[in-house]
Protein backbone atom coordinates (compact mmCIF):
# COMPACT_ATOMS: atom_id res chain seq x y z
CA UNK A 1 0.00 0.00 0.00
CA UNK A 2 1.40 3.37 -1.01
CA UNK A 3 1.74 5.86 1.80
CA UNK A 4 2.17 9.40 0.45
CA UNK A 5 1.31 11.14 3.69
CA UNK A 6 1.38 10.52 7.41
CA UNK A 7 -0.47 7.42 8.55
CA UNK A 8 -2.11 9.46 11.32
CA UNK A 9 -5.85 10.06 11.28
CA UNK A 10 -6.68 13.74 11.51
CA UNK A 11 -9.74 15.61 12.64
CA UNK A 12 -10.44 19.32 12.81
CA UNK A 13 -8.83 20.75 15.95
CA UNK A 14 -12.08 22.57 16.72
CA UNK A 15 -13.86 19.18 16.89
CA UNK A 16 -11.35 17.57 19.24
CA UNK A 17 -13.39 18.47 22.34
CA UNK A 18 -16.47 16.90 20.73
CA UNK A 19 -14.50 13.71 20.09
CA UNK A 20 -13.34 13.70 23.73
CA UNK A 21 -16.84 14.34 25.06
CA UNK A 22 -18.30 11.47 23.02
CA UNK A 23 -15.57 8.97 23.95
CA UNK A 24 -14.59 9.69 27.56
CA UNK A 25 -16.58 8.74 30.62
CA UNK A 26 -18.89 5.93 31.66
CA UNK A 27 -21.93 7.21 29.74
CA UNK A 28 -20.12 8.16 26.54
CA UNK A 29 -21.73 6.58 23.47
CA UNK A 30 -18.41 5.56 21.88
CA UNK A 31 -15.62 3.54 23.46
CA UNK A 32 -12.83 4.99 21.34
CA UNK A 33 -12.06 7.86 19.02
CA UNK A 34 -11.59 5.24 16.30
CA UNK A 35 -15.21 4.12 16.73
CA UNK A 36 -16.42 7.72 16.63
CA UNK A 37 -14.28 8.45 13.55
CA UNK A 38 -15.69 5.42 11.71
CA UNK A 39 -19.25 6.43 12.60
CA UNK A 40 -18.64 10.05 11.61
CA UNK A 41 -17.14 8.97 8.29
CA UNK A 42 -20.15 6.75 7.60
CA UNK A 43 -22.56 9.59 8.40
CA UNK A 44 -20.61 11.95 6.14
CA UNK A 45 -20.61 9.42 3.29
CA UNK A 46 -24.35 8.85 3.78
CA UNK A 47 -24.90 12.63 3.58
CA UNK A 48 -22.61 12.80 0.54
CA UNK A 49 -20.77 15.83 1.87
CA UNK A 50 -17.03 16.34 2.33
CA UNK A 51 -15.70 19.20 4.42
CA UNK A 52 -12.02 20.10 4.35
CA UNK A 53 -10.08 20.08 7.61
CA UNK A 54 -8.47 23.47 8.05
CA UNK A 55 -6.54 22.94 11.30
CA UNK A 56 -5.84 19.21 11.61
CA UNK A 57 -5.22 17.42 14.89
CA UNK A 58 -3.97 13.85 14.86
CA UNK A 59 -6.00 11.43 17.00
CA UNK A 60 -4.58 7.96 16.21
CA UNK A 61 -2.57 5.97 13.67
CA UNK A 62 -3.78 3.79 10.78
CA UNK A 63 -2.44 0.79 12.71
CA UNK A 64 -5.30 1.18 15.21
CA UNK A 65 -7.74 0.00 12.52
CA UNK A 66 -8.28 -3.76 12.62
CA UNK A 67 -7.52 -5.65 9.42
CA UNK A 68 -10.54 -7.94 9.80
CA UNK A 69 -13.25 -5.33 10.45
CA UNK A 70 -12.21 -1.69 10.26
CA UNK A 71 -10.12 -1.65 7.08
CA UNK A 72 -12.72 -3.55 5.00
CA UNK A 73 -15.32 -1.09 6.35
CA UNK A 74 -13.14 1.86 5.26
CA UNK A 75 -12.69 0.26 1.84
CA UNK A 76 -16.45 -0.24 1.51
CA UNK A 77 -17.09 3.40 2.40
CA UNK A 78 -14.61 4.63 -0.21
CA UNK A 79 -15.97 2.33 -2.92
CA UNK A 80 -19.56 3.30 -2.06
CA UNK A 81 -18.85 6.89 -3.10
CA UNK A 82 -17.77 5.77 -6.55
CA UNK A 83 -14.01 5.88 -6.19
CA UNK A 84 -12.11 3.54 -8.54
CA UNK A 85 -10.98 0.27 -7.00
CA UNK A 86 -7.29 1.15 -7.36
CA UNK A 87 -7.72 3.77 -4.62
CA UNK A 88 -7.56 0.84 -2.20
CA UNK A 89 -3.81 0.78 -2.88
CA UNK A 90 -3.41 4.37 -1.70
CA UNK A 91 -3.81 4.70 2.05
CA UNK A 92 -3.16 8.45 1.95
CA UNK A 93 -6.00 9.09 -0.50
CA UNK A 94 -8.34 6.90 1.55
CA UNK A 95 -7.51 8.88 4.68
CA UNK A 96 -7.83 12.24 2.93
CA UNK A 97 -11.31 11.36 1.69
CA UNK A 98 -12.61 9.79 4.88
CA UNK A 99 -11.26 12.54 7.12
CA UNK A 100 -13.31 15.04 5.12
CA UNK A 101 -16.43 12.89 5.28
CA UNK A 102 -15.87 12.36 9.02
CA UNK A 103 -15.61 16.12 9.44
CA UNK A 104 -19.13 16.40 8.04
CA UNK A 105 -20.36 13.47 10.11
CA UNK A 106 -19.10 14.82 13.42
CA UNK A 107 -20.86 18.11 12.69
CA UNK A 108 -24.09 16.19 12.15
CA UNK A 109 -23.60 14.39 15.47
CA UNK A 110 -22.91 17.73 17.15
CA UNK A 111 -26.05 19.27 15.67
CA UNK A 112 -28.13 16.38 16.96
CA UNK A 113 -26.58 16.70 20.41
CA UNK A 114 -27.30 20.42 20.61
CA UNK A 115 -30.90 20.05 19.43
CA UNK A 116 -31.74 17.06 21.61
CA UNK A 117 -32.46 16.50 25.26
CA UNK A 118 -31.80 12.76 24.93
CA UNK A 119 -28.86 11.23 26.79
CA UNK A 120 -25.84 10.85 24.53
CA UNK A 121 -26.03 7.06 24.32
CA UNK A 122 -29.65 7.10 23.17
CA UNK A 123 -28.86 9.86 20.70
CA UNK A 124 -25.97 7.96 19.14
CA UNK A 125 -28.20 4.91 18.74
CA UNK A 126 -30.91 7.05 17.12
CA UNK A 127 -28.46 8.52 14.62
CA UNK A 128 -27.01 5.12 13.76
CA UNK A 129 -30.50 3.69 13.22
CA UNK A 130 -31.36 6.53 10.82
CA UNK A 131 -28.15 6.17 8.80
Image (tube, rainbow, N blue to C red):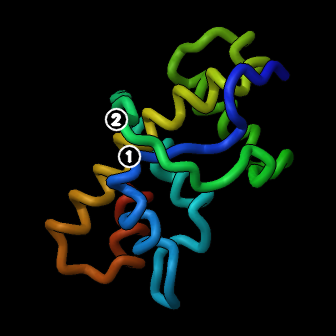
Q: Residue 107 location in percent, x, y?
A: 30, 50
Residue located at (56% from left, 24% from top): 80
Q: Nearer the viewer, mark 1 or mark 2?
A: 1
**Which quadrant is home to the N terminus?**
top right
- What SS does tag 2 mark? helix
Residue located at (33% from left, 53% from top): 14
Q: Residue 60 location in percent, x, y?
A: 66, 54
Q: Residue 79 location in percent, x, y?
A: 62, 22
Q: In the rendered image of this protein, does residue 79 appear above or below residue 119?
A: above
* Lateral position of residue 36 relative to residue 91, left or right: left
The residue labelled by disc 1 is 105
Q: Nearer the viewer, residue 20 or 128?
A: 20
Of mark 1 and mark 2, the one earlier in the sequence is 2
Marks 1/2 in contact by CB < 8 Å: the verdict is yes
Q: Nearer the viewer, residue 19 or 30?
A: 19
Residue located at (69% from left, 15% from top): 87
Q: Looking at this rendering, what residue extends furthest in the left direction?
A: 115
Q: Residue 54 location in percent, x, y?
A: 36, 35
User: From mark 1 to mark 2, how far is it between C-alphas?
Assistant: 8 Å
- What SS does tag 1 mark? helix
The residue labelled by disc 2 is 47
Q: Residues within 10 Å of mark 1 (few under 14, many from 20)?
A: many
* Lateral position of residue 6 relative to residue 128, left or right: right
Q: Looking at this rendering, what residue extends furthest in the bottom direction?
A: 26
Q: Nearer the viewer, residue 83 or 8?
A: 8
Q: Quadrant of residue 121?
A: bottom left
Q: In the rendered image of this protein, does residue 11 appear above or below residue 92?
A: below
Q: Mark number for residue 7?
A: none
Amino acid sequence: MTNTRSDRINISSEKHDTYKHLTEGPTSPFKTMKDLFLTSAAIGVEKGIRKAIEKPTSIFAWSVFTSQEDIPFLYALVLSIGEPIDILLEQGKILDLLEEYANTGIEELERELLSSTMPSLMLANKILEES
